Amino acid sequence: MRIRSRSTQLLALAFVAAASLPAAAQKPAGDTPAATFSGGAATAPGKAMADGTLKTSATVVGIEAATRTVTLKRQDGKVVSIPLGEDVRNFDQLKVGDKVSVEYSQAIALELKKTKGVAGAAESGKLTRSQPGQKPGGQAVREVEVLADVVQVDAKKKLVTLKGPAGNMVDLAVEDPEQLKNIKKGDQVLALYRESLAVKVEAAK
C-alpha cells in the first residue's frame, strides 16, 4: 500500500524507496546505510500485530528553480535529483545545505472475529502541509480497515485463505499452531492497517 500524496512522495521517492532494508543490511561494516529500520511483532490468541519504521535523511546540494528540481545527497553518499510538482508548497524556501529528514512507518493489526458481519473495507486519510513561508514538508497518514471472510484453513501448510470485500483471495501464513487452532472456515478477520510518511526540512546550521 502506498500513500497517495504526491507532495510527500516526490520528496521521499528517490532516496527512501531506493533504500530497501535488505540492501542496507548487506553493506559492509563501517558504511553508512541508506536508511535505518526498526520494528517488531507480537501475537496473542486470535490476534497479531506488526509495525516498522524507516528513517533516512539527505542534504540539499543543488536547486534548479526553472525546472523545480532539487538535488539531494543521501546519508549513504549517493546523489539523486528529484523534480517537485506545483503541489509542493514553499519551494522557494528551499536552500542549498538544508537537511531533509523522512520517517515512514507502517502498522497492521489482525483480530479474529467470531461474530458474523458483512465483509467490507473503509479507508481514511489526512494530509498536513507546511504553512506559507515555512520550509516545505508535512505528513500524510492513511488508515484502512478491512473485514475479510475465512474461506479455507490448511493446517499442514499453515495457510489461511481470506476472501476480501471485493472478492479477492489472499493466503495468510500463520506460523503459530496455537493461533491456527483458533481459526476456522466461516470466521472473519478484521485487519487494521495504518501508514504515515513525514517529511521535514531544516535550515543548514
Image (spheres, rainbow, N blue to C red):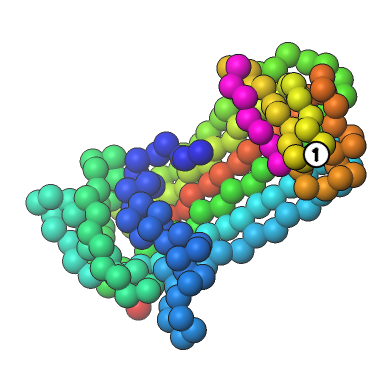
Outermost residue to the left: 66
Q: Is residue 174 above or below residue 28?
A: above
Residue 175, x across and y down, in percent: 78, 47
Residue 114 in which image quadrant: top right
Q: Which residues are magenta?
A: 167-173
Left or right of 118? Residue 107 is left
Mark 1: amino acid? Lys
The rendered magenta stretch, by its main secondary structure, is classed as strand
Q: Is residue 28 above or below residue 176?
A: below
Q: Is residue 109 visible?
A: no
Residue 201, x across and y down, in percent: 37, 61
Residue indicated by mark 1: 156
Measuring 78% from the left and 33% from the top, which residue is drawn there? Answer: 154
Q: Does residue 68 show up magenta in the picture? A: no
Residue 11, x across and y down, in percent: 34, 53
Outermost residue to the bottom: 30
10 or 205, nearer to the observer: 10
Q: Does residue 168 show up magenta in the picture? A: yes
Q: Is residue 165 visible?
A: yes
Q: Quadrant of the C terminus?
A: bottom left
